[in-house]
Image (cartoon, helix red, strand yellow):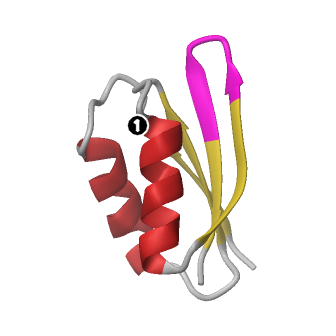
Amino acid sequence: MTEQTLDVTGLKCPLPILKAKKALAVLETGDVLTVLATDVGAPDDFAAFCRQTGHVLLESSQEGDVFKLVLKHR
């Protein structure tokens, strides 16, 4: 299992989702991608993205201004 971190802090929608989609494209089933974002819409955006694509949102948390979103590749 591979674990990667994608830092998209400072980027606004739709860039965090687009960059995460690109990062997930090279990962395999069961791999984990941790996304760090500052866009206030990121938690809702990633929840919707996972529902639509079949990836699993393992964690959605916030520390200060940074959202941590952990996705498991479908």
Q: Residues within 10 Å of mark 1 (few under 14, many from 20)?
A: some
Does 9 appear above or below 73? above
Answer left or right for 47 relative to 59: left
Q: Position of residue 27 (x, y in %)?
A: 52, 79
- Measured as percent of width and height from the top left, residue 57 is found at 65, 60
- Up/down of 63 relative to 26, above or below: above
Q: Is residue 7 visible?
A: no
Question: In terms of secondary structure, what is the magenta stretch mainly?
Answer: strand
Decide if residue 41 is on the left or right side of residue 66.
Answer: left
Toward which corner of the image does residue 22 lie, by quadrant? bottom left
Residue placed at 48% from the left, 52% from the top? 46
Tell me which residue sits at (53%, 80%) in the image. Answer: 54
Q: Say which quarter of the image contains residue 63.
A: top right
User: Across the whole image, how many numbered discs are drawn on residues?
Assistant: 1
Q: Which residues are magenta?
A: 62-68
SS for tag 1?
A: loop
- Say which of 56 and 48 sits in front: 48
Q: Residue at x 36, y 66 (%)?
A: 21
User: Is 65 on the left or on the right of 56, as rendered?
Assistant: left
Quadrant of the rendering where the N terminus is positioned: bottom right
Residue 7, position in %: x, y?
Answer: 48, 38
Residue 2: where, in percent of width, then height?
Answer: 69, 73
Q: Tell me the amino acid under the disc marked 1.
A: Val
Viewer can see residue 50: yes
Q: Which residue shows up at 65% across the image and 11% down it?
A: 64
Write down the residue under mark 1. 8
- Compared to residue 37, the image places residue 71 above or below, namely below
Above or below: residue 71 compared with residue 68 = below
